[in-house]
Every structure is written in structure tokens, then in C-alpha cells.
Image (cartoon, rainbow, N blue to C red):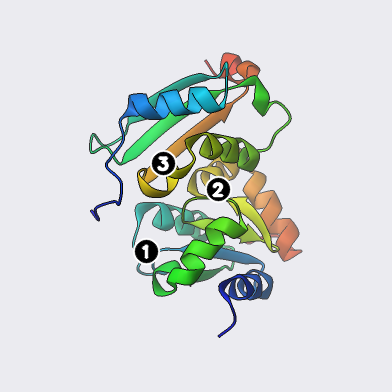
Amino acid sequence: MARYSGELMEAQEIKQMIECGLPGAHVEVRDFTGGGDHFEALVVSESFEGKGLVERHQAVYGALGDAMKARIHALTLKVMTPSQYQNRR
Amino acid sequence: MADPIERIRTAITSDKIVIFMKGNRNFPQCGFSAATVEVFEELGAPYATVDVLADQEVRDAVKTYSNWPTIPQVFINGKFIGGCDIVRELHSSGELQTLVKAALGESAHQ
């Protein structure tokens, strides 16, 4: 696997960045491979109401800012509104 | 050579379905690119690919163009649809087939 320019991130760090960028969101982040470069995140936020998938993902990427460019190789996202999350369970 | 944004515009207007990916359909160089190509193979829809590993300028410019930080990126009728997760999510909900049918203007064969 190619080395990345920044040092790798922790799931906890990604969780905090998303919570910062999307206040009030419910966020779960898991290191998918244990290698610190492929994460899976669930983000539940009222701000997603009425937004399509692309917009929702872009909001999460916006919260992660430059980290997304240099330090996160792969981030699989699940993005839902609170009602979608309730019905999902 | 045209600047990268021009090359992107030309690519996404030359074919109905365009996938900016790492590698090509026969030799995808990344799991997400491979999974994205797989979805369109399953749909049996004709698509073009652009190997961003062969064009670093386009690789960077397409991320700004679509305001999307990762590769692969899928365009249908010149419009950014999403990366691997969204394409797979649209595929499982059936929305992708609807988009493809509308773009191809006829029923996408199974």
C-alpha cells in the first residue's frame, strides 16, 4: 500500500472532526481494515433532510477538510436523517 | 494539450456514462474502482473510462471540478453522480438503473 503524505488517522479523530463540522450529528466510525487508512463511518444528521446522497457526502467531506485529501485513503460513508436511521433498525 | 478541466469536459460530454477510475475496466488498480466498474458491467450499460493514473493533472482537477475528494467518480449525461458508495447505494435502490435508462434513452439490457 502506498504511503500517504500525512500520518494516518484514528477512528476517534475522524469521529470528532465530523461531529465538529456537523453539530448534533450521531457519528460512528470504524477502522475497516485495522490498518488506519480505510474507515467506515455512519453519520446521522437532521441537516441531511431534503439533501441527496452527493450533498450529504460532500457535507461530511467538508467537515474533514484537508484530512480527506492527504490522510484518509478510503472512507466508506452511510449518511442518514434521524428518521431514516430509526426505520433502518 | 487542452487544460485538464477542458479534458474533463470533453470526456464527460463524449459519452453518456463516464467513470474516472484508477486503471481501466480490465485492470482496475483499486478495489473501489473495480467495484464501480462491476456495477455497470452488471447493468450491461455501455460506459467509458478515464484512467486518472495516466493523467495526474486530470486526477487532481476532477476532484475540484466535482467537489469530491476521491476516485472513482461517475458522471452520467455530464452530471456528477457520485463515487463508489453512492453508485452502489443507487444500484441497490434501483435508482441507478432508472438514471442509466433515462441517459441511454432506451431500456438498458440486462
- Pointer 3 local density, CA inside 10 Å: few below 14, some 14–19, many at least 20: some
- Pointer 1 local density, CA inside 10 Å: few below 14, some 14–19, many at least 20: some
Residue receiving disc 2? B87
Q: Is residue B22 left or right of residue A78?
A: left
Amino acid residing under circle 2? Val
Of residues B5 and B11, the one drawn nearer to the viewer in this rendering: B5
Residue receiving disc 1? B28
- Give the quadrant of the C terminus of chain B: bottom right
Amino acid residing under circle 3? Ala
Kindly identify which chain the residue marked by label 1 belongs to. B
Which residue is rendered at x = 69% and y = 71% of the image?
B13
The percent coordinates of residue B18 (x first, y second) are: 58, 66
Q: Please count the marks in the image.
A: 3
Which residue is rendered at x = 49% and y = 49% of the image?
B84
Kindly identify which chain the residue marked by label 2 belongs to. B
Tell me the CA gap for discs 2 and 1: 17 Å
